[in-house]
Image (cartoon, coloured by chain):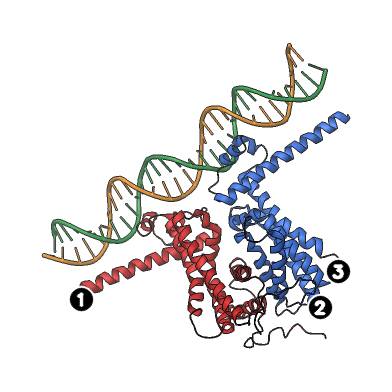
Chain colours: A red, B blue, C green, D orange
Amino acid sequence: MRATKVSTSLKAEVAALKRRRILEVATDLFYDSGYENTTLEEVADRLKVTKPFIYSHYSSKARLLADICELGIACSLAEINKVLPSSVGPEQKLRLFGEGFVLAVIGSQKQLAIYNREEKNLEPEDVQRIGRMRREFDRKLNVLLDEGVARGVFRIEDRELATLAIGGMVSWASVWYRPRGRLAPDTLATRITNLIFNVVRCDDARAPDRARTAPKQR
Amino acid sequence: MRATKVSTSLKAEVAALKRRRILEVATDLFYDSGYENTTLEEVADRLKVTKPFIYSHYSSKARLLADICELGIACSLAEINKVLPSSVGPEQKLRLFGEGFVLAVIGSQKQLAIYNREEKNLEPEDVQRIGRMRREFDRKLNVLLDEGVARGVFRIEDRELATLAIGGMVSWASVWYRPRGRLAPDTLATRITNLIFNVVRCDDARAPDRARTAPKQR
DNA sequence: GTACACATATACTGGCAGGTAGATTCCGAA
DNA sequence: TTCGGAATCTACCTGCCAGTATATGTGTAC
């Protein structure tokens, strides 16, 4: 009994591993060449297997795409969920969120880029499900900003627009970020978060020497 | 002679009109359904013509895509080119540029969305050409920010990053903007530009009652 | 060692859409 | 009215690739 249980569990783990590897390779190829320009045979080739192997784990090419896209959004959503319920002040929340969000975006860069590019190739139900996740993210970021406004620490002209602006500023990193770029992820996270603080016009005490570079004269 | 000249010029105008209409319809369809999911026959149908008609004006589907993408980037590039050489101060330049840029992005929303989604379907030479235009835009925005920093009116921690952040904040509007949305283009342009001023930490005197909404308490 | 089940491969189909060759229509000129 | 050529259409081809029917191997139980 024990043996069979371990065996089935192992089987499940093996299956999960296979699915994960398929997803990884597909992510790389979709990111580099685009969804429609990537053949499932190419995915199979790179894994040294054949097309039916993939179909035994994913029912269609579109489901593969859906998993990739969902993974990307889930990473960002997890960050706001992690921070929002905590009991620290809005400034601290925003800093934690900002840095987590930036790291999530560059960590799931390929998935997010694929989602933004290939949404039109998703099944309508997947579009809706993932769209709901995105709207949930926006709503929660909006709440975070609202807390800061209510306490008078953020000065925001248009909260909804600020949400979109912050989301865009960070999400855009999935377009231009390169792993071997000028800035390490941590530095990037800090500096972009500083820019987020600028957007909400919050003088964040905890930020290390911000804008110390600018006042050369005067 | 006069007659023939007018005649040939008219012919050229007609040809240009046809190309423009093809481009418009293709833009709508590519935007709504994606490049690969749109058939040239669908484009032809909507124009009440046939596929070879399109091929008599565009040598391939990819060339059509390239023209759409280039048009989108050209609109944004034109804005920075319009503002950069003027002799007003950096704050004024930034305001003019910001508002022009936002209006350009929402004016060429479909083209920009298509470019961002379908770059992988462009011919390599088109990718390069349009990529150069994008880099030119970034370089020039960088120059504009540099002028402000040099004069001590912008306080920027990392100029290159600020360029990307501003570009992202505005470009992202091509993802979320809806013509029947809450804000009219002009209002949107003003408010997003205000956010750009926040990013560069510039207290812009000419901005109308910014941040007047926030200090409810205290 | 044989039978069964599961995993994976070989080999195929079917439809779609980009692109084109050749027929046809339309229009301006003489 | 007819001629020539440009514009446009009809009808077709061809390659590609998602998805599948069927075969084959591989390990495990008895």
* Amino acid at the residue labelled 3: Val
In this figure, which residue is indicated by the disc labeled 2? Answer: B150
Residue A21 placement, left or right of A116 = left
In this figure, which residue is indicated by the disc labeled 3? Answer: B88
Placement of A193 over or under D17, stated as above or below: below
Asked if disc 3 and disc 2 are in contact, CB closer than 8 Å, the reply is no
Seen from the viewer's position, the closer of residues A149 and B16 is A149
Q: Nearer the viewer, mark 3 or mark 2?
A: 3
Seen from the viewer's position, the closer of residues B158 and A178 is B158
Q: Position of residue A15 (x, y in %)?
A: 34, 66
Residues at marks 3 and 1, CA–CA distance in whole angstroms: 80 Å
Confirm whether residue A65 shows in the render: no
Respond whether the residues carrying marks 3 and 2 are from the same subunit. Answer: yes
Residue A127 placement, left or right of D5 = left
Query: What secondary structure is found at the residue carrying circle 1?
Result: helix
Compare marks 3 and 2 and give the one earlier in the sequence.
3
Placement of B165 over or under C25, stated as above or below: below
Q: Residue at x 66, y 63 (%)?
A: B171
Residue A166 placement, left or right of B8 = left
Q: Position of residue D26 (x, y in %)?
A: 27, 62
Seen from the viewer's position, the closer of residues A43 and A141 is A141
| Disc marking residue A2 | 1
